[in-house]
Image: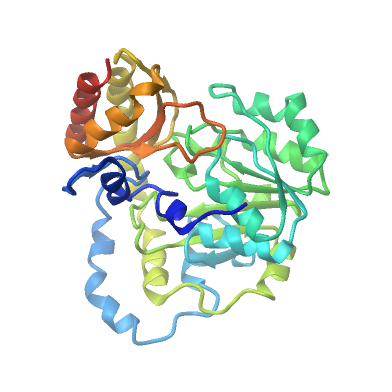
Amino acid sequence: MSQTVEDQKDAHGGTPSVLFQRYGIEPRSVIDFSVNLSPLELPESILALWNQLPQRIAHYPSTDGAGVKAYYTQRFGLDADCVIAGNGSLELMYFLQRVQRYQHVLVPQPAFHDYQRSACAGGAQVHSCQRPLGQDYDAFLCSAPFREALAKVDAVFLGSPNNPDGATASADCILDLCAQYPNTHFLIDQAFIQFLPIPGRASLLNPQHLRPNLFVFHSLTKYYAIAGLRIGSLIAHPESIRALSQVREPWSVNSVAETIATELATCSTYDTALRAWLATESQHFDAALSKIPGIQLYPSATNFRLLRLNDPSQYDQVLTELLQQGQHVRCCKNFPGLPAGCFRIGFQAHDANQALVAALQKSVS
């Protein structure tokens, strides 16, 4: 798979400047709905740490990201020998692919494009199969087309919750697959798992769920809205982590990230506040979005929604008008497997969400 530098500029959210240039719009301040970050402010205890950080950066961090590992031990009961800390979970996806050198990797579509890109970077041939939007995720994983594709590869990459549509598989279903296909590696991205109202049913961040062929990626970036800091992890069976650690570069996590991660482990009230806010805001936002004629809403329990224009020919016009009003949504043209006319929105503050609804009502005919 080839991908140009220009392609990469538009490969993720948070780049309104790309759309300003594409649609010939004078750059301006925007509310960025293209990113899937928590709209809540950082916990007060984290903000209080900033004055201490200059002292921390004068010293080397731990060689293995011990502060990040401590977060997973305290929050999820995972031993440090089950975790590799990294500069965001995305960096660890590429790391695993380079080390394992899979020959054939399955990426069901639609999916986050870096699953495919990281597999190609590791030298794998990427296979795909289509998951119908709106289909129950567990049902899809039990379906004949998926099982037929799975039998031909040595690894499969799944997002759960999945980006861009938020579909989520149960932990039991994935663990059953691990048992049924012991020679296949299951690479599961759970960057959004903490946003779920009750993560337990779907979460693989559990010491009881460790399997020799299961590799779970997790990120603190989105849940705590610290995208510029980059903190993530790869969670796997201790034997797998031991082998991977032999070829892992030292000092992959900086001392600022370690300090913040250690403190975040104590911020349980943040979880309560965020999930309560998200439950209330989801009801308001979904009700308002579902009433807009000309738009299809794909339900999700995460902090983002996938929408589709019934008339895809309006796509560029609608995105242009939103940008002109200072609202940047995620263009989804680079998500393979999505029908034409799809875009994604991440939750922002309530007033901003309502303003987006009003703008969509005006732009979509």
Closer-to-camera residue (27/225): 27
Closer-to-camera residue (213/184): 184
x then y, percent, for residue 146 = 73, 31
Color style of the picture: rainbow
Question: Looking at the image, how many numbered discs can be counted on the residues?
Answer: 0
Mark yes or no: residue 74 visible.
yes
x then y, percent, for residue 62 = 49, 79
Looking at the image, which residue is at 55% across and 39% down? 111
x then y, percent, for residue 209 = 67, 47
Query: For the view shown, which residue lies furthest in the front direction?
Result: 24
For residue 201, side relative to residue 330 (left or right): right
Above or below residue 27? Residue 358 is above
Above or below residue 3? Residue 49 is below
Q: Which image quadrant for residue 127? A: top right
**Quarter in which the C terminus is drawn:** top left
Above or below residue 112? Residue 360 is above
Above or below residue 185? Residue 51 is below
Mark yes or no: residue 72 visible.
no
Closer-to-camera residue (58/259): 58
Looking at the image, which residue is at 42% across and 40% down? 195
Looking at the image, which residue is at 20% across and 20% down? 362
x then y, percent, for residue 230 = 42, 62
